[in-house]
Amino acid sequence: MTNKLVVGILAHVDAGKTTLSEGMLYLNGKIGKLGRVDNKDAYLDTYELERARGITIFSKQAVFGMGDMQITLLDTPGHVDFSAEMERTLQVLDYAILVVSGADGVQGHTKTLWRLLDMYRIPVFIFVNKMDQAGTDRKKLIKELKSQLDEGCIDFGQDQSEVFYDQLAMCNEAIMEDYITAESVGLGKIRQAVRDRQVFPSFFGAALKLEGIESFMQGIMRYAVIPAYPEEFGAKVFKISRDEQGNRLTHMKLTGGRLKVRDVVKNKGWEEKVNQIRIYSGQKFQPVTEIEAGSVFAVAGLTQTRPGEGLGAEEESDAPVLEPVLSYRIMLPEGCDPRMFIPKLRQIEEEEPELHIVWDEELQEIQMQIMGEVQLEIMQSLIQSRFGISVSFDSGRIVYKETIANVVEGVGHFEPLRHYAEVHLLLEPGEPGSGLEFRTDCSEDVLGKSWQRLVLTHLMEKSHKGILTGADITDMKITLVSGKAHNKHTEGGDFREATYRAVRQGLMEAQPVLLEPFYSFQLELPEKMVGRAMTDIEKMHGSCEISSTNGEQAILTGSAPVIAMKNYQKEVVAYTRGMGRLFCTLKGYEPCHNTEEVIAEIGYNPDNDYGNPTGSVFCAQGSGFIVSWDQVKKHMHLESYLQIKAGTADETASRPVSFKGERNISPQEIDLILNRTFYANQGRKSSWKKRRTARDSYYEPSNRNIRRGETVVRKEYLLVDGYNVIFAWPELKALAEENMDGARTRLLDILCNYQGIRKCRIIAVFDAYRVQGHREETAVYNNIHVVYTREAQTADQYIEKFAYDNQMKYNITVATSDGLQQIIIRGAGSSLLSARELKLEIDGANQRIKQEISENQAKDRNYLMDALSTEIKGHMEKLTKGE
């Protein structure tokens, strides 16, 4: 087995990262000519966009030999706008090379890279570049590395003298013992200290002149440790791309075992066959039939993979730390249908998951999250080159987040007919930048382990919205503390609903805090303009301090809101006449400086967000009813976790098995109640016969609801299970066998015509739950709405959820011939039409309209005989009889 080492190269933009890569490839014989960024012929800048802009946008790899090692060098983007691409690459590195500009020292983005390398626990070799430029000072720079990065940064280019060993000994106790006893340090101890991130070998040179590169590479060979890999198959996916022919490629590192062409790779919910294995080096690749552990390669044939996914024994990666802070609206050219364009954008989203492309049905727009203006320009060019569509973007909006300031207990209850789940979650504020942490503190005697795991899965599977602006929540600890299932009537989907509602109910009770993104900045400018800059930062609600000054130039460092500093670079260039430079890097999220203004501008109402309900569903007399968030704890069946801890629990609030009653009810009584209501809903009891039938309710709908003495007009909704109806109507079923799109369009046209007659709101729902990665999409088709469900959600589930969430607000009728779905819909209190009854109703409505038109036309006609006098009529009759 070859000694394989995967090394990534990272840097602040313009530090000379690509130049160092070219020098390493040239000196190892991989390339015969040195490429340059400014000449647009760098070996690893393979995309036209990269060569045109002179920056690295996409991570690439080169494979070359170095001594007895096979090095896979991964070149990553240096510009902050493409830092998410860089972070994805960190998941597969054995070692990292951090390039620092000797002329500029440790810059803002360099510190961000260092924090990420620390978080991913990646050992680092440092190369200080551009040492040929005037004013560079080696001793000053190593001191800056120690103070700004880590004390373990040691100059490995110096002689291995007593001073060198003294510096090493200060980093590691084992090295200290070696040095005290033997007055030298063993190579193995130094290697281990580098591997454990206690020592960071630092080298100096000038990559453009090939100075210092050879000794730097010898240092990597001498001090790097080749990883050992297990026999069990494992792989880490870090990137998705497409080749020039449009083939989808999965880039991964094999972390265990071997992989062959035609092998079957599987993960949760999917398994696919490997069609081709490619080892890329620059723009070219070499196809191989088998790959061994430690290799980085691309696989063709896999369509379900995504960045960060672990295959085999490998675990899934955590969500990236760096994420976009700006949201832009994509404006399409005239005549471009957004519904046809979104699938194209999904291809780009596969490659750049942080874009979070969404279709906003309410605003009728496509939104995309972006790191900055440079990425915006690149996306524009990429869409144009790949799809031939020229798009533009609006001015952009800030991506806000929300957290809480106090500890609350959120309760979610989901108990429509024949369903049951209750979830209690403890919501606590987390440390700034900690994200979301999910855990359990619940006895298995209260809630089984499998149900607890399911609740955690539902907590992690979606982005939960805050209640101030509808922004994603962050920096919180969410702990499952209690819950309840029913032995017979609980299904997995019940806990999903209860979990989501528990989060929202808790957020409604908590003290919410709006967060906005902040930049850390470094501003270099003439010393005489420091006062102007500090005044600007103060106006931006930021903070700063003078970190250094030399009588002519000064450096200000600090932080400020992203929205305030968004265009400040242009101002700096203007008032310093080109002598000032601003470097910004994302610091994280902090409390918003203008919360009330942002809330008013966004205008979010959590009670009207029907996709994220704050209330819960309880059951009484065989029918579900909705309880608002502020009343949920009066109806909940379990005791309050916080009250139990405080010793103030109210015994009357505890109804562990009661289905909304005044006394405790046994499980046997519950089954009897459910069975009675089940058969009643099938029309097998006289009580059901006394009610209005579904058809009666639909033909003569009661659209007025008396509430607290007021008359409330309720809107009518007709939800149609699209594919169920298509396969129930013979003419559509026949059409579907030849062309499903044609059958779908025909059904929609029929429903559009029917809506014009009935004047109700119609939603046609189609399953898309088998489509990997598909998100729920809603579109307007003429005068009706069409919904394509998200992955893992059926049309039945969407309709059921809509019915439960809105039964108190609207008169809802569901058209389906699914027997189980009919039972559930009846239990929710909605009216029902079978597919056959819907057909009869539509045909009858069309016939009535034709009859009315015919009668109106008859009334409007003018007959000649009607306008004649009696005398002339008699004369005309004689003429017709031949008299």
Image (tube, rainbow, N blue to C red):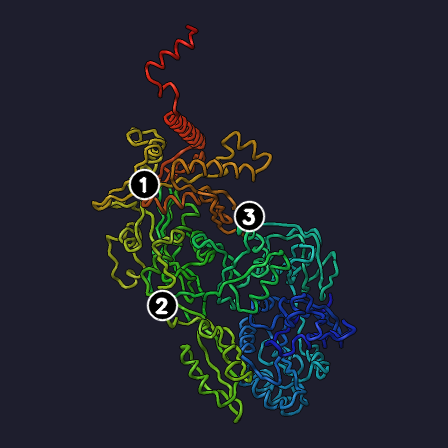
Pointer 2: residues within 10 angstroms few (<14), some, or many (20+)?
few
Label whose residue precedes the other's in the sequence (1 or 2): 2
Which quadrant: the N terminus?
Answer: bottom right
The residue to which callout 2 is attached is: 597
The one of 823 and 858 positioned closer to us in this rendering: 858
* Numbered disc in front, either 3 or 1: 3
Residue 74 visible somewhere in the drawing: no
Residue 209 placed where, x, y %? 72, 83
What's the mark number on residue 623?
1
Q: Give the Cα distance between marks 1 and 2.
A: 43 Å
Residue 318 placed where, x, y %? 52, 64
The one of 357 and 281 positioned closer to us in this rendering: 357
**Lateral position of residue 796 relative to residue 299, left or right:** left
* Numbered disc in front, either 2 or 3: 2
Residue type for callout 3: Val
Q: Is residue 238 above or below residue 617?
A: below
Residue type for callout 2: Glu
What's the mark number on residue 771?
3
What's the mark number on residue 862?
none
